[in-house]
Amino acid sequence: MRKVVFFLLFAFFAFGANAQQITRFGVVDTAKVYQAYFKASAPMRTYEAKKADFQKEIDKRTDEIRKLRQQLSEAKMSEDESKALKLDADIAKLTESLTEYTRTKNLELESLKNSLQNSNDFYNKLYNVIERVAENEGFTMILSLQQGNGIIWYSSSVDVTDKVIHELGY
């Protein structure tokens, strides 16, 4: 009888010790979270508005160049050399201006986008939310799918991406 009780106590403590050592892993698709967060954020809306304004200006300048090219074609057909030369010079000047404007604005947009992507405020908020979701769901470790070179397979039941997006309010 003592052996049975000893065995049962041993099994109980061994099982209890093993239960405490079980590690639950979860995964989060940080790229998907990032996309959802910034799609709805005020800084991203500002970025998108600037991008649209820049595109509108590019379209306006492109249309102006197109009209001048049409006039150049008409001037060449009517053999008006002086008008054709002037239009050709105007087209070259506007094309160069458009190229410079586009280059400058693309650099500006890229810089703005990089500053949004590297925002410490977002990452601090993200990590706090991931921590809260992990603790609420009973995970002891959350892995990022973007840095998951070692993750070969995972069950969707451990993917907390949608919960993190929801907790962020998006």
Image: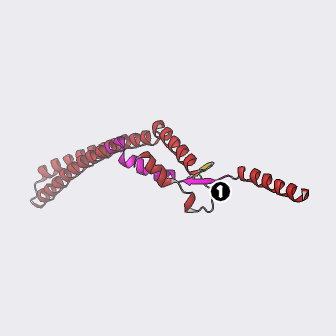
Q: Quadrant of residue 47?
A: top left
**Span of residues in magenta:** 23-45
Q: Is 157 colored magenta in this rendering? A: no
The quadrant of the image that shows the N terminus is bottom right
Is residue 25 shown above or below 101? below
Q: Position of residue 73 (x, y in %)?
A: 15, 59
Which residue is disc 1 drawn over? 150
Foreground of the two, 57 or 7: 7
Q: Position of residue 31 (x, y in %)?
A: 48, 52
Display colour scheme: secondary structure
Secondary structure, magenta segment, majority class: helix
Q: Is 40 colored magenta in this rendering? A: yes
Residue 149 relative to residue 91: left or right: right
Hey, what amino acid is under mark 1? Gly
Residue 94 relative to residue 164: left or right: left
- Residue 17 in view: yes
Foreground of the two, 138 or 8: 8
Q: Quadrant of residue 156?
A: bottom right
For the image, the number of numbered tags is: 1
Q: Position of residue 125 (x, y in %)?
A: 48, 40
